[in-house]
Image: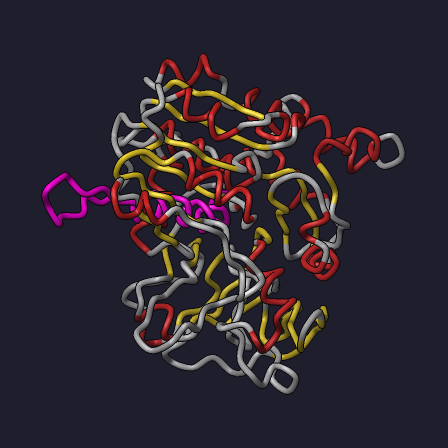
Amino acid sequence: MKTKAVRIYGKKDLRLEEFDLPELKDDEILAHVISDSICMSSHKAVLQGADHKRVPNDININPTIIGHEFAGVILEVGKKWQHKFKAGQKFSIQPAMNQMGTLNAPGYSYRFIGGDATRIIIPPIVMEANCLLPYDGEAFFPASLSEPMSCIIGAFHASYHTPPGTYKHNMGIRKGGNMAILAGVGPMGLGAIDYALHQERKPGLLTVTDIDDNRLIRASSIFTPEHAEKDGVQLVYVNTGKMKDPAGHLRDLTGDKGFDDVFIFAPVKPVIELGDAIMGFDGCLNFFAGPVNPEFKAEVNFYNVHYAFTHIVGTSGGNTDDMRESLKLMGEGKINPAIMITHIGGLDSVVDTTLNLPHIPGGKKLIYTNISMPLVALSNLGELGKKDAFYAGLHQIVSKNDYIWSLEAEKYLLANAKPI
C-alpha cells in the first residue's frame, strides 16, 4: 500500500514523498492518519537532524516520518492485536513510550510511523507500551491535541513540594497556592491556563505573563478573570516587558510571599531568571520549554536553594496516564484544546511550516494529512473567502465561534478540501 509522508533526511532536509509501505506483519497495525498538530519539538528535530537524541544516525539512507501529535482510524490489525483493536476504531498515540533503554518515538525514530503521513504502520513497541489509545470522540483534532495537553498535565504532576522537616515530596502543584506561568500565552501556555483553571488541584492565584499585548488580550478574552473567579481562582495577566522591576511587581501580587509554582514556557535566559527570582519558600520552578542549544544555561540563586528550599524540575512530554487524563477532561467538556489552534493546512504545507515554525505567529498549526492546502490563519479566512468559496464557507463556520476550531469546521474541511 502506498503512503504520502513528510520524511527527514538530515538537518533542515524535509521531503514530501510517496512510497510503498511494507507488507503488514502479524504484530503490526495499519492505520490511516487524519490529523496532526505540528510541535516545536519537530522543528528542533529538523534543525538537529541525526544529532537529535530521538533521530537515528542513518536518516540520510533510511529517512523517518516526522509528526507525533496525531490521530486517525485503524485500517487493519495484525493477528497478535486482534483481541484488543479492530478496523474502523479511532485512535490517538502517546509518542513518549518511556521504554527502558531507548528514546525512540513515533514522529522521530521510525520509517513507517509518524503523524505527517496518509497511512502508517504502527510497530509492536507502541502497543506493548500501551501507547495506542482508542478514541471515541467525533472530531479528530482533540485527539491530536491530547498529546500536547498530556505534556502540560505531566508538568503539573511533576512539580512537587516538601513539608518542612521532612524529606517527602508531595507531587503536584500546591492546591490553593500562588502559581505563575511565564511567557504563558502561546499555544502551550493557553493549554496550561485551561488546565490550571479546570482540573481538581487549582491554584488560588494564577499570574500569566508575556511581553506582547496582543497575545495577552487574546488570552484574557478566552480565559477572563471573571470566568476564573467562578472557578475559585484569581487570574492576573501581566506584561512584564513594560516594567522596570517585573520581579518586584510579581512578588507584590503575592504579598511578597512569592510563588509556590512557576512554569517557564519559553527557553529564554531572562525568563528563567525572573522565575527564579519570584519563587517563595519551597517554591518549585518547572522548566517546560526545551531549548535547541544543548549548552543553554541560566543563573540560579543558590542562596535560596539552600535557605528557602527552592528547587527546579524539568519535564519533556507526558506519559500515557497523562494522555488518558487529557482525553477524559476533553470528553467531559472541562478543557477545550481547540483554543490552541490558530492555523490549519494540508500535508503539502508541512515542510515549510515545520522549518519556519518559530517565525509563524499564532498558536498551534493543525494539519489534515489527506488534503492539499497551504497553511492558513483562521483569522485570515474572511479575506481569502472574498476570492474562494471554499474559504468563505469555512470562514462562516469559524467566525461564529470566535475563530475557534470546531467539529463543524473539521467536517466541512474534510468534505470540501482538495484531496492530496
174 and 245: which is toward the camera: 245
**Residue at image location 58% in from the left, 86% down from the top:** 58
Location of the N terminus (image quadrant) = bottom right
Q: Which residues make up the magenta segment?
A: 142-171
Q: In screen coordinates, is 406 left or right of 10?
A: left
Quadrant of residue 118 within the rendered picture: bottom right
In this view, 303 is above or below 116: above
Question: Which part of the image, by quadrant, shows the C terminus?
Answer: bottom right
Estimate the x, y position of residue 379 in percent, counting from the top left. 73, 31
Instruction: Tell me which corner region of the image, top left, top right, bottom left or bottom right, holds residue 82.
Output: bottom left
Would residue 348 be counted in the magenta stretch? no
For residue 138, above or below residue 371: above
Q: Residue furthest left?
A: 165
Toward the viewer: 235 or 354? 235
Q: Does the magenta run of residues contain 165?
A: yes
| 396 sits left or right of 40 in the view | right
Q: Going by the image, does 69 lie left or right of 281? A: right
Q: Position of residue 108 (x, y in %)?
A: 53, 69
**Residue 212 shown left or right of residue 202 in the figure:** right
User: Which of the pair 182/226 is nearer the observer?
Assistant: 182
Viewer-proximal residue among 334 and 391? 334
Residue projecting furthest to the right: 387
Q: Is residue 215 above or below residue 236?
A: below
Q: Is residue 113 visible?
A: yes
Q: Is residue 39 above or below residue 114?
A: above
Residue at (45% x, 49% y) in the render:
288
Q: Residue at x 42, y 49 (%)?
A: 300
What percent of the width, then of the height, locates residue 301? Answer: 39, 46
Q: Where does residue 112 sit, x and y in percent of width and height?
A: 54, 75
- Residue 14 appearing in the image: no
Q: Residue at x 72, y 26 (%)?
A: 396
